[in-house]
Image (tube, rainbow, N blue to C red):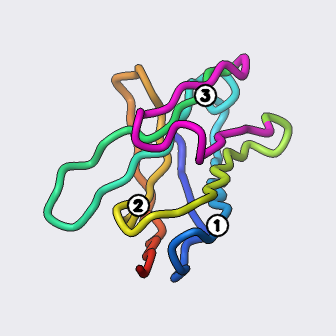
Amino acid sequence: QVQLVESGGGLVQAGGSLRLTCAASGSIFRMSAMGWYRQAPGKQRGLAAHITSGGITGYADSVKGRFTISRDNAKNTVYLQMNSLKPEDTGVYYCSTVGSDYRPWGQGTQVTVSS
């Protein structure tokens, strides 16, 4: 069983940066593709960025060129560096597995971007 703890969110002005961290416990982390999902107010949760166990990354068009996902398998941690933030990036950010039937959720971390 994997437990996930997200952190690093906050309030930032448009154009600013934040770095999110997801600490995972559990043996399957290193074998799993991981992703950062986000849920804006009143909208469904969607995948913003993902990274395979081997480090191949992918991004939603809305964040491409601004967000960078990375992972440290030795620390069971996934990061999301967010630059040039926009008000539409506001939402709760969660990390979880990608492409797996097993998709645990942590409490998420709130990101608020003011204009």
Relative to 54, say whether 75 is above or below: below
Q: Which residue is mark 1?
A: 18
For badge 3, the amino acid type reads Ile
Counting other residues with Cα less than 10 Å from the Cα at mark 1, is it few (<14), some (14-19), or many (20 or more)?
Answer: some
Residue 102 vs residue 19: left or right?
left
- Residue at 48% in and 43% down: 63
Mark 3–mark 2 Cα distance, whole angstroms, equals 20 Å
Q: Is residue 100 rendered to the left or right of residue 70?
A: left
Question: Looking at the image, which residue is at 40% across and 42% down?
Answer: 62
What crowding class fits label 3: few (fewer than 14 Cα within 10 Å), some (14-19), or many (20 or more)? many
Look at mark 2 in the image and give the residue it sits on. Answer: 89
The magenta segment: 54-72
For residue 51, which numbered disc appears in the image? 3
Q: Is residue 82 left or right of residue 76?
A: left
Circle 2: residue type = Asp
> In front: mark 3 or mark 2?
2
| Residue at the image point whose x is 54% and y is 53% from the top | 4
Residue 49: x percent and y percent?
50, 37
Circle 2: element type: helix
